[in-house]
Image (tube, helix red, strand yellow):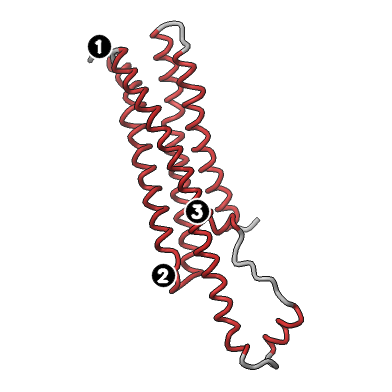
Amino acid sequence: MDSANLLIWIHVLAMAAYFGVQFAVLYILLPMAEGAADESQRRTALITGFKFYNPFTIAVLGVVVITGAMRLTDVKAEMKFEYFSRIMAPLSVKLGLAFLLIFIQTYITFGLSFRIGRQEEVAAHGDGEPFTVAQLDSMLSRIRAMTWITILLTATIIFVSLTSLKRAVSETATASFNTMIAPAQTNPNSEVMIHASVMKPKITPGSSFSIAY
């Protein structure tokens, strides 16, 4: 496996890990906390779960951003002057959605879930009061709603990658190939045309895997 494919796999696996942990919060952590015997156990379960969730989501999103930027640099080098004219529109949509996803996840992590554990620590040291049950329930409701939004955004980003962005890159690759062989077509006895008539190469502008990411 070459470095480009390895980069793509890391990018896809990081996105899958982020997608999966969001469902884990909705269908494992929050229901488990709601089924706790008392309020103390509920808070302990939430704090324990969020201690893993908070750094994990930030880390995998960081991997997604870094590997995506590296892959985009490679695509830009391959497309040269056609980069802006061909993929700027779908790429702008994808990047806009990605930044919105990061913004919302940052709010979930630092604005909601991290504060639950932090406030309990403050209360344990006698420097303040823990969140009331009503306050905690309100924060969990916002976490649940925002998590669903991140799931929808992630699915939309993947959809854009596999449709419009893939199509734009494919058209660019095909156009580049046609431009390359056009001069040779004026001379049917040229080496390029002879080779094409014998070999009939199949043009594959790029796999859906590499184009999408």
* Residue 59 placement (x, y as % from top left): 45, 39
The residue that appears at 51% across and 28% down in the rendered structure is 24
For disc 3, the neighbor class at 10 Å (few under 14, some 14 to 19, many from 20) is: many
The residue that appears at 46% across and 43% down in the rendered structure is 154
In this view, the residue in front, 184 or 46, is 184
In this picture, is 62 found above or below 8? above
Disc 3 from disc 1: Cα separation:
50 Å
Amino acid found under the numbered disc labelled 2: Ser
Quarter of the figure with the N terminus: bottom right
Does the CB distance between marks 3 and 2 fall below 8 Å?
no
Quarter residue 51 falls in = top left
For disc 1, the neighbor class at 10 Å (few under 14, some 14 to 19, many from 20) is: few
Residue 85's mark? 2
Identify the residue position indicated by label 3 in the image: 161
Identify the residue position indicated by label 1 in the image: 126
* Residue 108 placement (x, y as % from top left): 36, 32
Tell me the element at label 2. Answer: helix
The residue that appears at 46% across and 72% down in the rendered structure is 80
* Residue 90 placement (x, y as % from top left): 43, 59
First in sequence: mark 3 vs mark 2: 2
Quick one: which residue is furthest to the right in this view? 198
